[in-house]
Image (tube, rainbow, N blue to C red):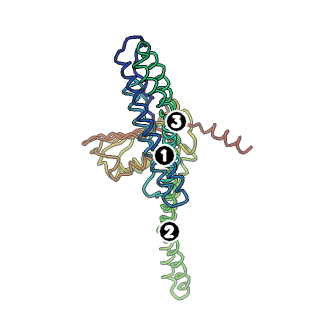
Amino acid sequence: MTMSPQVPDHDGPPPVRFAFDRWTWKEIAHLLSNLPMAIAGFVYTVLMVSIGVGLAVTVIGLPLLALGLQGARLLGRAERGRARGLLGVRIEEPSPMARVRREDGFFAWLWSSLKDPVGWRSVLYSFIRLPWGVVTFAVTLVGLFVLWPVLPYIARFLTNADRGMVRGLLSPSDELERRIAELESDRGVVVDTAAADLRRIERDLHDGAQARLVALAMGLGLAKEKLTDDPEAAAKMVDEAHGEVKVALQELRDLARGIHPAVLTDRGLDAALSAIASRCTVPVTVGVDLPGRPAQAIEGIAYFTVSELLQNVSKHARATRASVDVWRSADRLLIQVTDDGRGGASMDGGTGMSGLAERLDAVDGLFVLESPAGGPTTVTAELPWRDRESEKSAAGARTA
């Protein structure tokens, strides 16, 4: 995940002087508009907080407060726009509220809204602006008629305080705020993914190996009953049961491979990805260039990402060949899967691409899909690199 950099201030007002230039008039306009904006913000804040807190004992109090905080965000955006137009202060918009999925329900939205730091900072800004708005309006009004020669200096002094308040209260606090919101959203993705995997394993056990073993037990029971009366029929049933045992074992192996393949644990990504490639319906070239083995979690995510991408190649791409390349660049593990198929893949095309992107995003990874109509299709994935040895050392330290 990447963040857009902080938008720097542009050149801003030139050095202040006695002359009334364009910037001086903008600063005067800002100071005179402080009072009406401060009154509007103060009234809104007091009403919103008093009604929301006062009715908190009822079912509508906290939802009203949550909606009020979202309105305070809009007031903050208006103030940033005013500062941008009249003071030359260009500040990046704060991060949006943490995404709350519809299935998470009303209370998840309520909690996310009530703990929104951007909304509360906007409330604080609106609350403290009223006395400052009165002072700046009065001083500027007097300066227009009494202190005309030095008004540019007064305006610059007062608006510098305004610039400081806007930067301090209405700008993004720091990268931590954005990362907290992202991680809270990603945590839900991880939980949902884990729950879906558990449901898949349960379904595969119930409908596959478990059902087959039950049938096998029943078949062996019938063979036991016929053993003395009809040995030939019993032998035939035992032979069929032997075949069922082989199928059940293969299903269990496939299920274990879907959880965490033994070849990945024992021999690493190179051998594991080669095993995946051998099961693909098109020839696949595998290239793995790693200085060592990444942490187990990262290695597992890389394996299953390539596995699902190659399944997509087999099912949807109509390709004649594909390639898998894995390498390390600085502190990132990079994966690139390419095929010469028909292209046209998309993140919402029912091929699981959006799910892969969410899983990678949940571990601070990236997922980029390039698939023009007619091909080729190239998927590039990035994961954070963590050494396996350092992971073992950290685990040992925690145990100690």
Up the image or down, 37 lies above or below 12; here it is below
- Of the residues shown, which amino acid type is indicated by label 3? Ile
The structure residue drawn at horizontal position 49% and vertical position 35%, both measured from the top left corner, is 130
Q: CA distance from mark 2 to mark 3?
A: 63 Å
Residue 278 in the image: x percent, y percent? 42, 48
The structure residue drawn at horizontal position 32% and vertical position 46%, both measured from the top left corner, is 346
Q: CA distance from mark 1 to mark 2?
A: 26 Å
Up the image or down, 289 lies above or below 88; here it is below
The nearer-to-camera label among 3 and 1 is: 3
Residue 354 in the image: x percent, y percent? 39, 48
Foreground of the two, 148 or 248: 148
The structure residue drawn at horizontal position 36% and vertical position 42%, both measured from the top left corner, is 322
For the view shown, which residue lies furthest in the top direction? 18
Q: Which mark is residue 303?
A: 1
* Local secondary structure at mark 3: helix
Left or right: residue 66 compared with residue 283: right
Q: Which mark is residue 201?
A: none
Question: If you read the primary sequence from the N terminus, does the residue marked by circle 2 or circle 3 appear first?
Answer: 3
Number of residues whose C-alpha sits closer than 10 Å to that of mark 3, classed few (under 14), some (14–19) or many (20 or more): some
Residue 217 in the image: x percent, y percent? 54, 76
Q: Which mark is residue 206?
A: 2
The structure residue drawn at horizontal position 63% and vertical position 37%, both measured from the top left corner, is 390
Foreground of the two, 107 or 339: 107
Residue 121 in the image: x percent, y percent? 51, 39
* Local secondary structure at mark 2: helix
Question: If you read the primary sequence from the N terminus, does the residue marked by circle 3 or circle 1 appear first?
Answer: 3
Which residue lies under the disc numbered 3? 128
Asked if residue 104 can be seen in this view, the reply is yes
Foreground of the two, 326 or 301: 301
- Of the residues shown, which amino acid type is indicated by label 2? His
Number of residues whose C-alpha sits closer than 10 Å to that of mark 2, classed few (under 14), some (14–19) or many (20 or more): few
